[in-house]
């Protein structure tokens, strides 16, 4: 019986179905706060780019806000803060609303003054909060617009800007300034980015303050430890003398230099008003005329102290670059397409619009794409700049903000919404492809992953003939290998026969072998291991119990027949992989069901059996790289092989140098990353367990559990550090063994000085360059974990026989 006495009925799926007649259901009462928030969020979307919303609509919205202020002023403040931060391209319009509300002496003046002071407090609170990295810029720019509309006293904002620069100056004068530079650069960039939003009303109201502030910013920039960050350069060499793409460090230390150049250009041109920041004061002049005296903001306390968990300089540097990463801008396109005749500061502000929109709307990709395509207050064709920004974010070092798939889906949607977007995208791909021999190896992987996904949305259609020259290149050619990687990833998104059919016939030579297992040979082959593996497969398929299988192997004296426990382990694993070939789940079940006998054989035989296990995986699945990597991962999960054994196998078998056999080469690299990722994941899992225990059950028992977990954490961190150091040690050893006797190779002073790498056909040159590039990229890619073993890596660098190896490792540690 329902609460109102009505007996309802059960729906078809078991849910409660009321007895109201169709069309007579009671309408849900709309929350006025949600209605107002939605109104603010979408206000002006149909008036882009000028943001000239009709006066009647603006006045109606102001009326709704004032009514809500009377009921719940704090909710209105929170709503306004939310839309200002998340929809920053419309800050000028929101400031117009505040200006009109400020003309109401009854509720408006007090509210706007309170809100302006709250803005200042929020700025002060977010300055030293990594979580508020994206919040500070819109908040302080909103204060600048309030100054431009005559609502806030410019002197109040100058005090806030001065305090922020002061924090940066104080930190930069300390001994650990280098580690904190991403943070202090961030502060100064926030200050410089707010100046254009204040316009002439801010910059010309107290010109001596403007000049003094700019001089302080220039002095700070000149005294920085790093003017650019070589460890974050996406490309290791130049293409031509004036290659702006090579000069990029993903917008790390170089972004502040660009910001200062932009502000200087704005000051010299005396242009303090431009269309990128819509100036709405004249359009709403009558509505804003009756504004009262300007608001003087109350002083706010601002601190630059970050919440650090350690005093270790290397770990601090790791945390700072993670909290305040590079801007992620790479200048792929010519300025005539992205900047035109506009000021540099206009391009930077437009980039900020894109970056903030992507950050706050990535959870709704369709809405994000629509806002990027149709809701930017830019009165010019900006899709080339938008494409460049998205590509820069996808190829940002040391890591992306989001996964590759997010940028891929976003670009697919933009291709549908903006007809000219594919042309700009094609230009970015062309620039990357032309630099395939010098691009960071991890970026090459990201690019291959993205391109495979992108073409999968268009029936795998791609103008392959434009790249037909790679078909005549040797197997180790970087562009050819990139095309082969894209094809391999396309297969993972579909299936081999489908990709075979859609590829041009000439490109089918890039296809990997059709995925299949290496069948066991017949009894007449003379391969004893194979013969007994075949018999073992029959028992496994009959679901023989593990202990019975173990007894069967002992009763047949397989250790003596095959020549030792290593051979028996090799035979058993081979049988298990063949028996579980149907799917990944079948393989897992087979390995787990017969884990006992296999574990005993491998444990008793030590590293030799572990190395033999990886040999078997490659032997069985060498025509299916994905399944081979899955098998290695599963063996490591079951603790049947260790990370260091996998690393040793990769380097001892020379797979990373066997670029002629690209399948074994790819398996080697993928296995290496499986090993490293697994040991790092174990550290992350234990840390997550500790955090969960602290959150769920604060008690004495929880303290004991945390102590136990912390011991496990120390062990996992030690294992991860040992594996990372072991990898770098092997990189150095391989490079020394292959090239230390070569006087030419030993004479190179920098990566870009290696002759003929770009477009080179010299196998030795390309191999030397790629090993160095992979060493650098590997250390940078795992920078968070390398912070725990920096001293050991520096020792390895000092012991390298080739000076360039030393330089590359030290540069990669700068991240």
Image (cartoon, rainbow, N blue to C red):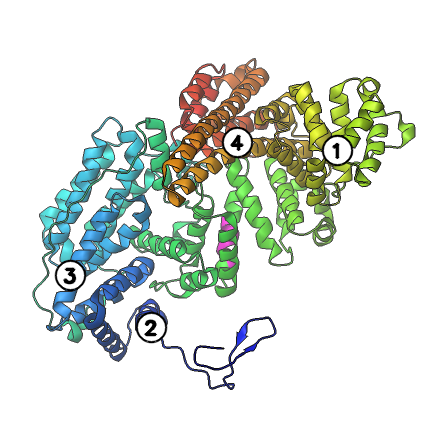
Which badge, 3 or 4, comes first in the chain's sequence?
A: 3
| Left or right of 782 on screen, residue 280 | left
For disc 1, the neighbor class at 10 Å (few under 14, some 14 to 19, many from 20) is some
Tags 2 and 1 in contact by the CB under 8 Å rule?
no
Q: CA distance from mark 3 to mark 1?
A: 73 Å
For disc 4, the neighbor class at 10 Å (few under 14, some 14 to 19, many from 20) is many
Q: Residue 239: in sight, yes or no?
A: no
What residue would you read off at disc 2?
Answer: 31
| Left or right of 705 on screen, residue 268 | left
When asked about the image quadrant of residue 174, the answer is top left
* Residue sitting nearer the eye, 99 or 315: 315
Q: CA distance from mark 3 to mark 4?
A: 52 Å
What residue would you read off at disc 1?
Answer: 546
For marks 3 and 2, give the one nearer the viewer.
2
For disc 3, the neighbor class at 10 Å (few under 14, some 14 to 19, many from 20) is some
| Left or right of 591 on screen, residue 533 | right
Q: CA distance from mark 2 to mark 4?
A: 49 Å
What residue would you read off at disc 3?
Answer: 114
For marks 3 and 1, give the one nearer the viewer.
1
Which badge, 3 or 2, comes first in the chain's sequence?
A: 2
């Amino acid at each position: 019986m329902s609460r109102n006495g009505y007996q309802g009925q059960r729906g078809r799926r078991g849910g409660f179905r009321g007895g109201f007649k169709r069309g007579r259901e009671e309408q849900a009462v709309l929350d006025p706060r949600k209605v107002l928030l939605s109104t603010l969020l979408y206000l002006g979307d149909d008036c882009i780019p000028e943001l000239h919303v009709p006066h009647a609509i603006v006045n109606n919205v102001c009326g709704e806000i004032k009514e809500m202020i009377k009921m719940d002023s704090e909710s209105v403040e929170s709503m306004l803060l939310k839309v200002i931060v998340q929809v920053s391209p419309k800050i000028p319009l929101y400031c117009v609303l505040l200006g009109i509300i400020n003309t109401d002496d009854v509720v408006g003046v007090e509210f706007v003054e309170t809100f302006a002071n709250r803005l200042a407090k929020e700025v002060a609170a977010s300055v030293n909060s990594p979580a508020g990295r994206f919040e500070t810029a819109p908040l302080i720019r909103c204060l600048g617009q309030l100054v431009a509309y005559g609502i806030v006293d410019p002197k109040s904002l100058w005090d806030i800007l001065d305090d922020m620069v002061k924090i940066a100056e104080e930190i930069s004068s300390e001994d650990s300034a280098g580690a904190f530079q991403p943070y202090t650069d961030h502060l100064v960039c926030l200050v410089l980015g707010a100046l254009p939003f204040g316009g002439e009303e801010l910059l010309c109201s107290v010109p001596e303050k403007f000049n003094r502030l700019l001089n302080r910013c220039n002095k700070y920039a000149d005294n920085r430890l790093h003017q650019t960050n070589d460890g974050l350069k996406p490309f290791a060499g130049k293409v031509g003398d004036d290659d702006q793409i090579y000069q990029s460090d993903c917008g790390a230390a170089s972004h502040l230099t660009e910001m200062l150049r932009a502000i200087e250009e704005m000051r010299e041109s005396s242009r303090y008003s431009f269309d990128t920041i819509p100036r709405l004061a004249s359009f709403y002049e009558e509505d804003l005329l009756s504004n009262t005296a300007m608001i003087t903001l109350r002083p706010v306390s601002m601190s630059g102290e970050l919440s650090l968990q350690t005093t270790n300089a290397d770990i601090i540097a790791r945390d700072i670059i993670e909290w305040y990463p590079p801007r992620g801008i790479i200048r792929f396109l010519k300025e005539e397409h992205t900047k035109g005749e506009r000021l540099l500061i206009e391009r930077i502000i437009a980039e900020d619009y894109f970056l903030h929109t992507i950050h706050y709307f990535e959870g709704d990709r369709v809405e994000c794409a629509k806002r990027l395509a149709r809701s930017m207050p830019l009165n010019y064709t900006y899709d080339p700049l938008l494409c460049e920004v998205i590509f820069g974010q996808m190829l940002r070092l040391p890591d992306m903000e989001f996964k590759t798939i997010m940028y891929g889906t976003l670009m697919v949607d933009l291709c549908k919404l903006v007809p000219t977007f594919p042309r700009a995208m094609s230009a970015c791909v062309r620039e990357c492809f032309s630099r395939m021999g010098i691009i960071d190896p991890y970026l090459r992987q990201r690019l291959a992953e993205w391109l495979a996904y992108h073409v999968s949305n268009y029936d795998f259609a791609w103008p392959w003939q434009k790249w037909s020259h790679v078909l005549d290149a040797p197997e180790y050619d970087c562009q050819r290998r990139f095309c082969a990687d894209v094809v391999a990833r396309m297969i993972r998104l579909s299936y081999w026969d489908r990709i075979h059919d859609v590829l041009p016939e000439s490109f089918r030579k890039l296809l990997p072998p059709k995925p299949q297992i290496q069948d066991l040979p017949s009894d007449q082959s003379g391969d004893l291991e194979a013969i007994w593996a075949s018999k073992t497969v029959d028992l496994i398929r009959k679901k023989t119990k593990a202990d019975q299988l173990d007894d069967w192997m002992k009763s047949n004296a397989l250790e003596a027949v095959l020549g030792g426990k290593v051979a028996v382990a090799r035979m058993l694993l081979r049988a298990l992989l063949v028996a579980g070939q149907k799917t990944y789940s079948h393989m897992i079940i087979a390995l787990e069901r017969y884990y006992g006998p296999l574990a005993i054989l491998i444990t008793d035989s030590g590293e030799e059996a572990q190395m033999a296990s990886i040999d078997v995986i490659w032997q069985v699945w060498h025509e299916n790289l994905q399944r081979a990597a899955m098998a290695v991962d599963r063996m490591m999960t079951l603790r049947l092989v260790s990370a260091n054994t996998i690393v040793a196998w990769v380097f001892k078998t020379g797979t990373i140098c066997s670029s002629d056999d690209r399948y074994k080469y790819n398996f080697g690299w993928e296995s290496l990353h499986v090993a490293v990722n697994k040991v790092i994941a174990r550290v992350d899992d234990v840390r997550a367990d500790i955090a969960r225990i602290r959150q769920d059950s604060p008690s004495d028992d929880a303290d004991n559990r945390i102590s136990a977990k912390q011991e496990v954490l120390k062990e996992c961190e030690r294992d991860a550090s040992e594996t990372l150091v072991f990898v770098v040690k092997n990189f150095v050893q391989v490079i020394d063994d292959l090239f230390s006797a070569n006087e030419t190779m030993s004479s190179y002073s920098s990566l870009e000085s290696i002759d003929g790498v770009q477009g080179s056909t010299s196998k030795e040159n390309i191999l030397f360059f790629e090993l160095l590039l992979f060493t650098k990229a590997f250390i940078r890619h795992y920078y968070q974990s390398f912070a725990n073993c920096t001293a050991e890596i520096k020792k390895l660098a000092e012991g390298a026989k080739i000076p360039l190896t030393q330089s590359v490792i030290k540069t990669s540690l700068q991240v």
